[in-house]
Each structure stands twice: as C-alpha cells, then as structure tokens.
Amino acid sequence: MFQTWQDLLFLHWEYDVDEIQQTLPPGLYVDTFEDRAYLGIVPFFMKNVRPRFCPSVPGISNFMETNLRTYVYDERGIAGVWFYSLDANQWLAVKLARTFFKLPYFYAAMHEQRDQSGQVITYDVGRRGVDQGLHSRFCYQSAGSIRHAQPGTLEFFLVERYILFAYSAQTRSLSTGQVYHTPYPIIEAEVSEWDSYLLEIDGFSQPLRAPDHILMSPGVTVDIFALAQASS
C-alpha cells in the first residue's frame, strides 16, 4: 500500500515498563531506551493512500490520523511498533485497516485549521462513541532546521521503526508488517496546545505533565507491505 505521511507531530511520555508490559499480547515485550519506556501520541495527515500503481481516489485517499503507540520487540528480538489505537476520519480506511491489517482503527471526527502562513496547524480529534469531553486538540508548528535522527539517540529509537505488530485475539496469533520509507526528516516543534486524553481512553493513567519529548516531521512517502504471521 502506497501513501504519504505529512506534518507528523511526535509527543512522547516516559511510562512505567510494567504498566505497559501488562497491556501487550503474548510474544511482545517492552523495548526501552536507557531503561525507559515510552508511549507516544502521533497526529498527522495521510495523503494519496492507494495500492501501488493505482490512482488516488478523491474523498478516500486523503484523511487525518492519530495513533497511540509504544515500542516493543518480539521473541526473535525484532523491534517494532505496537499500536493501541489509530483514529481516522475516513470510515472506509478504518474498515479496510481493521479487516486486512488487524489494526485497532477507530472512526473519529477530526478537523484541521491552519493560519494564513500555513505553518501553524490546529488539529482536533474526537473518537466517535466516546465521551465528547475527551476531545483532543493539538496546535503546533515547526521550529529550527531539518535534520535526521542519529543511531544511538532517543530520537532514533522513537521514530526510526520499520516493523509494526498486530495481534488477532480470534486466532491468538501475532503478525508483522514491514514499513518502508527513507529516514524521517525531523525538526523541533513549538506546541502551544496538547492533551493526553487518548492515553486515558485507551486505558492508561494520565501523565499529568507535558510531554517528555517533542518532535515534528514534514513527512515521508511510505510503502506498507502485507502482514505475515510472526515466526517463533
């Protein structure tokens, strides 16, 4: 599946390793950086989503998405991303992702607004069927110069992930999917509004503090390959 991810905001909080481990399916383990585990909220924009060699479809191929994630490795030691939720405002994308990728997508009401310069992004998301008081807003813009994360740094640990994991409760099986893109161009971000309601909705304790790590990326072009059952 071909797609472009644009204007990604990475908000991360340090979390207790044991609290995260209790939420993971069999066969996955919390990945840590300097003995610290992280949960991340990542709002961004999906563009040109389509099968490779097929054209984009107006009204379907472009939408907003926000995910809640952590970082894990499997019994083979392969590191990747575990998603607790992926909220999107395109119902067909939600249905297809749930069916074919076994990922926890949710249909959400989402809205974006930009200032006259186009640089300041206000991003609203509220999961349908959930208390509307638990609506999230992020207001952010880039600041500084673009660079790439260096191996061995926290930035690299958080953003340079090319494997995703999915779990089927029905078959009690773990699957992996490969994600291919060039390394993220990253940049510092100024964030004037944020919240952590997604953590509460997905069953975690509220951090009651600002994110411990903030980054932004202008985006990458991505290929996502079909899931395959993880081998032990």
Image (cartoon, grey):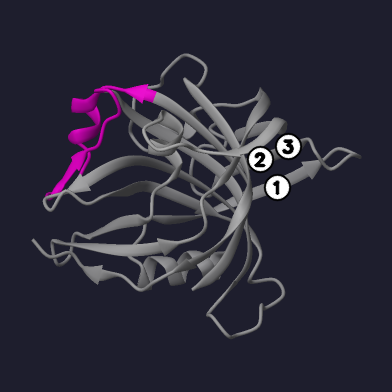
**185 in the magenta segment:** no
Residue 111 disc label: 1
Mark 3 — residue?
A: 122
In the image, taking residue 137 as reference, residue 171 lies left or right, namely left
User: Callout 3, which amino acid?
Assistant: Thr
- Compared to residue 226, the image places residue 90 above or below, namely above
In the image, taking residue 167 as reference, residue 139 lies left or right, namely right
Are the residues at dot 3 and dot 2 in contact (C-beta closer than 8 Å)? yes
Q: Nearer the viewer, residue 215 or 182?
A: 182
Distance of mark 3 from mark 1, alpha carbons?
A: 8 Å
**Residue under the point 46% across and 51% down:** 86
User: Callout 2, which amino acid?
Assistant: Asp
Can residue 133 be seen in this snapshot? no
Could you tell me residue 180's position as x and y percent? 45, 63
Residue 226 figure quarter: bottom left
Are the residues at dot 3 and dot 1 in contact (C-beta closer than 8 Å)? no
**Residue under the point 79% across and 43% down:** 113
Counting residues from the N terminus, which is met first, the one under dot 1 or under dot 2?
1
- Compared to residue 177, the image places residue 69 above or below, namely above
Distance of mark 3 from mark 2, alpha carbons?
A: 7 Å
**Residue under the point 73% across and 46% down:** 112
User: Callout 1, which amino acid?
Assistant: His
Distance of mark 1 from mark 2, alpha carbons?
A: 5 Å
Mark 2 — residue?
A: 124
Residue range (magenta): 14-35
Q: How many labels does the image show?
A: 3
Are the residues at dot 1 and dot 2 in contact (C-beta closer than 8 Å)? yes
